């Protein structure tokens, strides 16, 4: 049985592992691992843990998560100050990838101030865990009067696009083969 609960500090390393294991990017070096966790995990768990939810098994071990920054302007300010310099140390290619992703979100942040990342281990997919995580986050953000939520997704990731559409997200823009998807809350 999979349960959904708020993020706890003890989850941090497991969530990093899930981020790496579920990545569609090639992971061959420590720099690639570091980039993934800096870009898609650490800010959210370190700064906005109150907006993060974890899917756990019967032993309270994380098998998936949904991480969220509720306000892009705040996220951008903190991310640029503390996380982007660490990404830049990994190399300019990582730095430009991070800047590009942030720029894509910036374009739509007025209408969709919150953004998310969701990952679930393969063995737990197809069991409704993602929808339960998504519903938990949407209800949480609604209670905080956050008006809308967005994400970015590879256009070739057809299963993910189908999942997001099933959860009421709409394609806002197709940018260079990636979708910006959003939902009004």
Image: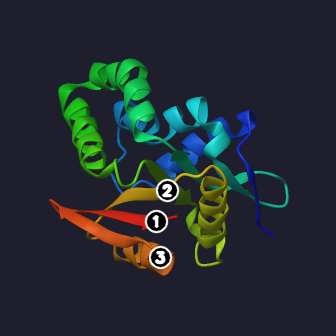
Give how far across and how far down residue 66 sits, in percent: 58, 54
- State the SS at label 3: loop
Q: Mark 3 and mark 1: span between their CA atoms? A: 9 Å
Q: Which residue is mark 1?
A: 184
> What label sits on residue 140 in the rendered view?
none
Residue 147's tag is 2
Tags 2 and 1 touching, CB below 8 Å: yes
Q: Is disc 2 placed on a helix, strand or loop?
A: loop
Type of colouring: rainbow
Q: Nearer the viewer, mark 3 or mark 1?
A: 1
Within-10-Å neighbours for mark 1: few <14, some 14–19, many 20+: some
CA–CA distance in space, label 2 to label 3: 14 Å
Above or below 88: residue 107: below
Would residue 51 be found to the left or right of residue 97 on screen?
right
Residue at 36% over, 54% down = 111
Mark 3 neighbour class, 10 Å CA radius: few under 14, some 14 to 19, many 20 or more: few
Q: Which residue is rendered at x = 76% and y = 66% of the image? A: 2
**Residue under label 3:** 168
Rendered position, 130 above or below 9: below
Q: Nearer the viewer, residue 69 or 21?
A: 69
For the residues bearing labels 2 and 3, Cβ distance under 8 angstroms: no
Of mark 2 and mark 1, the one earlier in the sequence is 2
35 left or right, relative to 56: left
Left or right of 109: which side holds 163? right
Residue drawn 48% across the image and 52% down it: 116
Looking at the rendering, which quadrant does residue 31 occupy?
Answer: top left
Q: Residue 143: image x %, image y %?
A: 67, 54
Where does residue 6 sit, x and y in percent of width and height?
74, 48
Residue 25 is situated, as x and y percent measured from the top left of the image, at 33, 52
Determine the residue positioned at 53% across, 57% down.
119
């Amino acid at each position: 049985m999979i349960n959904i609960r708020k993020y706890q500090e003890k989850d941090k390393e497991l969530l990093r592992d899930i981020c790496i294991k579920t990545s569609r990017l090639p992971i061959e070096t420590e720099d690639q691992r570091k980039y993934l966790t800096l870009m898609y995990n650490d800010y959210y768990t370190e700064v906005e843990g109150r907006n993060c939810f974890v899917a756990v098994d019967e032993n309270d071990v994380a098998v998936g998560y949904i991480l969220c920054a509720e306000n892009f302007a705040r996220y951008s300010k903190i991310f640029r100050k503390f996380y982007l310099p660490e990404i830049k140390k990994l190399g300019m290619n990582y730095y430009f990838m991070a800047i590009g992703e942030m720029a894509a979100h910036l374009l739509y942040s007025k209408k969709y101030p919150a953004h998310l990342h969701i990952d679930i281990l393969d063995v737990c997919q197809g069991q409704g865990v993602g929808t339960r995580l998504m519903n938990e986050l949407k209800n949480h953000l609604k209670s905080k009067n956050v008006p809308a939520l967005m994400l970015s997704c590879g256009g070739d990731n057809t299963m993910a696009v189908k999942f997001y559409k099933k959860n009421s997200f709409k394609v806002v823009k197709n940018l260079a083969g990636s979708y910006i998807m959003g939902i009004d809350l």
